[in-house]
């Protein structure tokens, strides 16, 4: 009897169930409404502009009246794939993104685990505050500080020069090989504290009785971390990893543009900075949109693939 009632409930249409839920939880939907409106206006409506990636857009004619691009609208994509810069941009984007991911993804987890073991509250709060601070500094100021630190007379340049690892009196950002390490280390400095917050929150939710039971069984701190702490926050780690993978190709152009110069384009120029130059500086909007669209499609594909792999291997995923 119960089974038949359940089956009957499943047959109710989505519209009727939504109507009932709206009546029942109208306060929650009212709170959600501004968020929905924000995303419709600023995230979904601008997607209409993606059409210009398939057209030879001119502002005088508008989006709909502009002529379609060659090769059934795919002309700008083909032009980008055949361009001299395609492989260089792809290589630089993947190199910088994957290097950043490799360093900045595990670092906040390690910081959170270390802070979890600290018993001196004042020391713990001081470390947390100092590690959060760079997150609240604007990208422009951060890049100005980096230029000072690694400039010809910067303290990092002088220290590396004293160790024989760099040439004194010359900015590290003038060397092609030094751009990626400089970028990755500055990202680590800027994001480690803020990224650790979610793991610290996850650690705070672990049942303390598990640790007591482990101590009774003779487990030391390392074994408790290995068998209780890390498995307890594994869901959070996997979720954050999938989200990070989804941004591999979306390397922010602001920081790159503020740090690089034409002399190091071979290692510093990435897809997003190329889109900026083509779109805003050269007014080649259709080509720029096509490159950006390609970038977004790759990111979406990476999220879907990484989510499937995680679900297959760990039975956990975003959806």
Image (cartoon, rainbow, N blue to C red):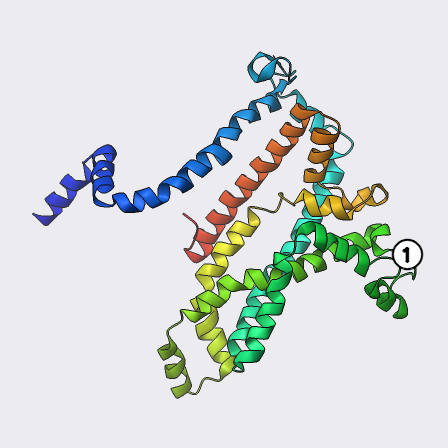
In this rendering, the count of numbered labels is 1
Query: Relative to the observer, which residue lies in front, 78 or 197?
Result: 197
Q: Is residue 164 above or below residue 51?
A: below
Name the residue: 53% across, 30% down: 46
Q: Position of residue 89 (x, y in %)?
A: 73, 39
Image quadrant assignment for residue 250: top right
- Left-right relation of 14 to 173: left
Residue located at (62% from left, 68% from top) = 130
Indicate the quadrant where residue 204 lies.
bottom left
Residue at 37 percent of width and 73 percent of height:
207
Image side of residue 3 versus residue 268, left or right: left
User: Mark 1 sits on what residue?
Assistant: 170
Taking depth in this image into account, of 185 and 258 the one nearest to the observer is 258
**251 over 115 or under it: above or below:** above
The answer to which image quadrant residue 254 occupies is top right
| Residue 299 x %, y % | 57, 41
Asked if residue 128 is positioned above or below residue 60 in the image, the reply reads below
Percent coordinates x, y for residue 234 in the rendering: 46, 63
């Amino acid at each position: 009897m119960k089974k038949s009632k359940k089956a009957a409930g499943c047959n109710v249409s989505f519209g009727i169930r939504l109507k009932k839920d709206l009546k029942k939880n109208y306060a929650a939907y009212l709170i959600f409404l501004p968020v929905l409106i924000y995303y419709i206006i600023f995230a979904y409506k601008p997607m209409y502009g993606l059409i210009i990636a398939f057209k030879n857009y001119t502002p005088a004619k508008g989006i709909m009246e502009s002529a379609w691009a060659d090769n059934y609208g795919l002309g700008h994509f083909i032009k980008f794939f055949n361009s001299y810069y395609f492989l260089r941009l792809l290589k630089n984007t993947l190199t910088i993104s994957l290097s950043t991911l490799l360093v900045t993804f595990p670092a906040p987890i390690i910081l959170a685990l270390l802070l979890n073991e600290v018993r001196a509250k004042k020391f713990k709060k001081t470390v947390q505050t100092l590690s959060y601070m760079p997150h609240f500094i604007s990208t422009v100021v951060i890049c100005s500080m980096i230029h000072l630190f690694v400039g010809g007379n910067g303290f990092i340049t002088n220290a590396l020069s004293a160790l024989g690892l760099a040439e004194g009196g010359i900015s590290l950002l003038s060397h092609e090989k030094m751009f990626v390490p400089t970028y990755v280390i500055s990202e680590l400095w800027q994001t480690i504290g803020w990224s650790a917050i979610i793991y610290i929150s996850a650690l705070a939710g672990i049942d303390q009785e598990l640790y007591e039971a482990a101590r009774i069984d003779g487990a030391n701190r390392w074994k408790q971390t290995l068998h209780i702490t890390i498995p307890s926050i594994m869901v959070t780690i996997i979720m954050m990893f999938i989200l990070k993978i989804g941004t591999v190709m979306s390397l922010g152009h602001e920081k790159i543009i503020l740090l690089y110069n034409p002399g190091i384009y071979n290692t510093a120029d990435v897809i997003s900075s190329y889109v900026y130059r083509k779109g805003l500086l050269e007014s080649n909007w259709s080509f720029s949109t096509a490159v950006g669209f390609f970038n977004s499609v790759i990111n979406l594909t990476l999220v879907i693939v990484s989510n499937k792999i995680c679900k297959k291997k760990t039975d956990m995923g975003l959806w």
